[in-house]
Image: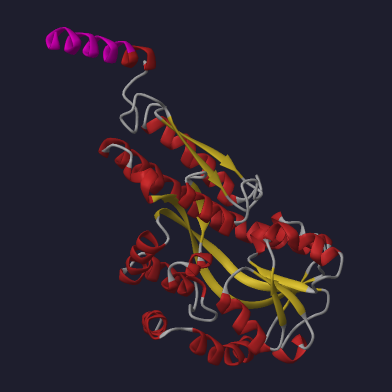
Amino acid sequence: MKKMLSIMAVSMLAMVLAACGGDESASGSGETVTWKLGHLSNEDHQWNKTAEKFAELVDEKTDGKLQIEIYPNEQLGSETEVLNGIEAGTVDMTISGETMQNWAPEAALMAAPYAFKGEDHLKSVVEGDIGADIESSIKENVGVTPLYYHMRAPRNLTSNQPIETPADLEGFKMRVPNVPLFMDTWEAAGARPQVMDFSEVFTGLQQGVIDGQENPVDLIQSAGFSEVQDYVNKTEHVYSWIYVVVGNEQFESLDEETQKAVQEAAAEAQSFGMDLYKSETEKITQELKDAGMEFVEVDQDAFSEAMKPAVEKSLSEEQLKLYERIVEAGK
């Protein structure tokens, strides 16, 4: 009797597996795996174009076993909401940077004002030991695995009046992302910063709720801020990078071969994105000028001096050590 039941059980299991059908998949479950990637930039932005390239490469390298669906324009929520969604399992991937400091304090150093001297300094940090330490903290504390990164054009302040020194910031209401360090440093420089989701910034500027915001030229352009702001003040207060990340659980659920394919696709997407960054940043700057925005030379030393005490005060002892390592690497 036991033998008969055993045979019946094996037969039923075989029928269930046959009904599921399909090839052996990325997760070994016999089904195509789909990851949802939600991010804040629009369809024409270099991050989105690179994400599309990455999805195409992943599809190709996994023989269609892993599919990536991309949702730009905060369709799946703000950066913070999507990170929470990854933890909850409702989203799989996003593009995130210093916002992750809310979980991993080291991520604050991805965009510390006036920490980096320029692109070469930044690249050496990201791809060296300091970058590895930051990635490790993100993986452990945020629960996501960085796959590749985008170098960002320096952040500049936009406004409807020229701003050349911190003295010009008196009473200036500005949007900052949900990054405590940004709140502290802009307040120290004399502005009145407030946190606002990126998708709300255009309306906030249009309605006069805020007087300005700070972002790299690519986001200034893709968000259409030239329609509601006259000046790009070249504060260049932050040189930074941003990661494309996937949930640890999602990545670790893949078999070894598929993980390798994803990492290969990520490396190729990294190179594709870097080429786009170089070609587009200069073009975008010119297009903003053509759209009527005036680029204002700024006393960067004065801004750096005004912000530095707030940077140092805002950082914990561990963060301050990392900050000093970054500054030292640029000497």
Q: Residue at x 46, y 74 (%)?
A: 109
The outermost residue toward the right is 207
Q: Residue at x 37, y 41 (%)?
A: 262
* Colour mode of the rendering: secondary structure
Looking at the figure, which quarter contains the C terminus?
bottom left
Among the 4 quarters of the image, the one containing residue 8: top left
Rendered location of residue 228, percent (x, y): 83, 64
Residue sitting nearer the eye, 156 or 254: 254
Question: Can I make out residue 59 in this image?
Answer: yes
Residue sitting nearer the eye, 185 or 148: 185
Rendered position, 91 above or below 137: above
In the displayed structure image, the side of residue 158 where residue 44 appears, left or right: left
Rendered location of residue 199, percent (x, y): 71, 56
Rendered location of residue 6, percent (x, y): 17, 13
Question: Can I make out residue 275 in this image?
Answer: no
Q: Residue at x 87, y 65 (%)?
A: 207
Q: Does the stretch in magenta take in 72?
A: no
Is the magenta region chiefly helix, strand or loop?
helix
Rendered position, 150 above or below 188: above
* Magenta-colored span: 1-15
Residue sitting nearer the eye, 244 or 115: 244
Looking at the figure, which quarter contains the N terminus?
top left
Rendered location of residue 210, percent (x, y): 79, 72
In the displayed structure image, the side of residue 175 where residue 184 appears, left or right: left
Q: Residue at x 65, y 59 (%)?
A: 218
The outermost residue toward the front is 1
Q: Does the stretch in magenta take in 5?
A: yes
**How many numbered markers are drawn?**
0
In the displayed structure image, the side of residue 330 where residue 296 appears, left or right: right
